[in-house]
Amino acid sequence: MGHSLVNVGIVGCGLIGRKRAAVIRAPHRLVAVADLHHERAASLAAQHPGCVVAAAPLDVIANPDIQLVALAATNDALAALVGAAIDAGKHVIVEKPAARRSVELEPLVATAHARGLVVKVGFNHRFHPAFVKAREIWESGTCGPLMFIRGRYGQGGRLGMEREWRGTPAISGGGEMLDQGVHLIDLARWFAGEFTSVQGQVSRYFWNWEVEDNGFALLRTPGGQIAWLQASCTEWKNLFSFEIYARDAKLHIEGLGGSYGTERLSVYRMLPQMGPPETTIHEYPGADASWDAEFAHVLDCIATGTPVNGGLEDAVAALRIVETLYAMSPALGEPLGAVKS
């Protein structure tokens, strides 16, 4: 679908900011960028003719030539930047989790709606092709009613990770359950609906920092469907696995490309005689297409008024679940293992 010209500004020019910039194509333009590290902003701007480096994030947001701002700052800055963008009448893509706590985001939901603005939270996993296909199959109704979901998301970490901003609660808001875990929670809500019972725990086993390195959640819907989720940064071999068990079929999404392995959707359909199921495998090798697809969706929402697939309400709901897990978990104490240097 064609869209009228949308000029974009980016706040935060690290890995995610660069991913956002990479999917902006003519006629749309990257107009201005800002980063606390000027050289990082200058490097990104140099790749986009006509793009300028702003002195501060609010200068990007205030730029009258910009219609859409992508916010890829640290978690402690995100909610205030979203609020400033809404006040300036800008559409927004803000990286997950969009805030450190739900209370930071809650007032912005109604304001964004009142202003008629698109505010998309970076739940890009909804736009991975395996999930797009799984959702299409799910919505066809051929799987039957949901029974339960099992999801695992793990990374192996990296040397020095305990010294990064993610390990400082005042900046990050939390550890692995907030970082990768919100993707699992968001995907589980996307298929199961709201969860009204939250059980589980977050723990620190290995990394010598102030946040959790593992989170475990057992979520229950009013109808009794369960989501069992684990987010980990002691996985050692990066892993993604998300299984949707329904009465008549199972959908299994695994791998996200790169170090997570080839992205794949396996569809297992139960036969009347049971036994081995009818199996269909969809594989999606190659580069991660979710960033392109998510950006295209935002442009569609701006052009047509279509509700966003993964917005502020979803971020608030995911944050509330993480907060409940934090509240019911014991103090983290000392890690059981030791970080290798």
Image (cartoon, helix red, strand yellow):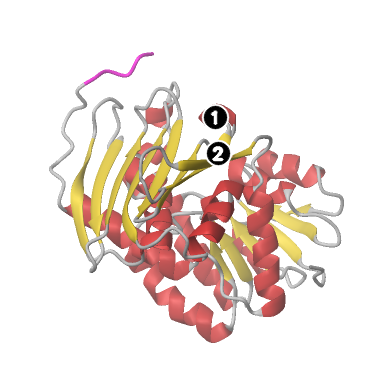
Q: What's drawn in magenta, residue-wise? A: 337-341
Q: CA distance from mark 2 to mark 1?
A: 9 Å
Occupied quadrant, residue 62:
bottom right
Considering every residue shown, the one lying at the far bottom of the view is: 114
Q: Which residue is mark 2?
A: 264
Report the front residue among 35 and 96: 96
Which dot marks residue 261?
1
- Residue at 56% in and 70% down: 308
Q: Position of residue 314 (x, y in %)?
A: 42, 65
Occupied quadrant, residue 320:
bottom left
User: Helix, strand, or loop for circle 1?
Assistant: loop
Q: Residues within 10 Å of mark 2 (few under 14, many from 20)?
A: many
Report the front residue among 226 and 294: 226
Q: Amino acid at mark 1?
A: Gly
- Please say if 289 is above or below 139: above
Report the front residue among 242 and 154: 242
